[in-house]
Image (cartoon, rainbow, N blue to C red):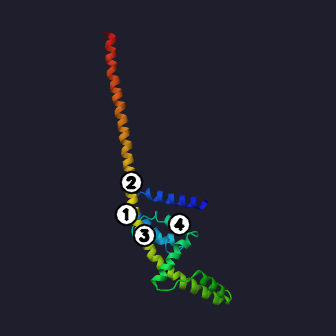
Amino acid sequence: MARKSLYRRILFFVVHHILHTDDTPSRIARGVAIGMFIAWLPLIGLQMLLVLGLSFIFRANKVVGLPIVWISNPFTLGPIYYPSYLLGSAMLKLQPVSIEDLEQRFAAVSYLPWAGRLKELADLLFGEIYYRTFIGSLVTGAIMAVGTYFLTVRAVKRHRQRRIARRARKLSKLAQRNIHTSSGENNQEAAEPEQSKSKGG
């Protein structure tokens, strides 16, 4: 429950932050799309710097994309990167490494000298896992970024239209109140001379 509540708060903060940003819908959407693209890349530790750099290059909003990279965190690494790993393996026409195979290989590596152990782990993690994951993440991140761009443009425009409509309704109600108030005062002013005439007569 606590984790779900945290996710909801983060989601509310991100959405509220995006919709209320003072910038054009296109620049906001580009910033969000860049953040979404970088969030899907296995580059934790460099993501915020990359978002800022790409936002500068593509003239996007530099602020809205930063919270998006929170999508990739220790709790979501598996759901985000494992499908990208499978996609990268399919694109490279390579058989994905199963969990059982990983366990066996890690167990076999533990018996090697430390230099050989580091080499085998590096070949396994970066050669067979990371490279495939990165290739798959490029495709997945690009698809997510394009979809997010158009959704953000639409969401920002609709939010602003609704905000304008709410302001128009408030102004209309205020104008009606002023009209009623002024008409009531005029009626009262018109009634006072009549009352004074009747008293004088």
Q: Which residue is mark 2?
A: 160
The answer to whether the residues at label 2 and label 3 have Cβ atoms under 8 Å apart is no
Dot 3 or dot 1, earlier in sequence: 1
CA gap, disc 1 and disc 4: 22 Å
Helix, strand or loop at disc 1? Answer: helix
Label 1 neighbour load within 10 Å: few <14, some 14-19, many 20+: some
Q: Which residue is mark 4?
A: 70
Q: Please tell me whether mark 2 sits on a helix, a strand or a loop.
A: helix
Q: Is residue 24 above or below residue 109?
A: above
Of pointers 4 and 3, the one earlier in the residue sequence: 4
Q: List the residue tagged with mark 3.
A: 145
Residue occupying image coordinates x 33% and y 26%: 186
Q: Earlier in the sequence, mark 2 or mark 3?
A: 3
Disc 3 secondary structure class: helix
Q: Amino acid at mark 3?
A: Ala
Mark 2–mark 1 CB contact (< 8 Å): no
Q: Could you give the CA–CA distance between mark 2 and mark 1, rounded to whole angstroms?
A: 13 Å
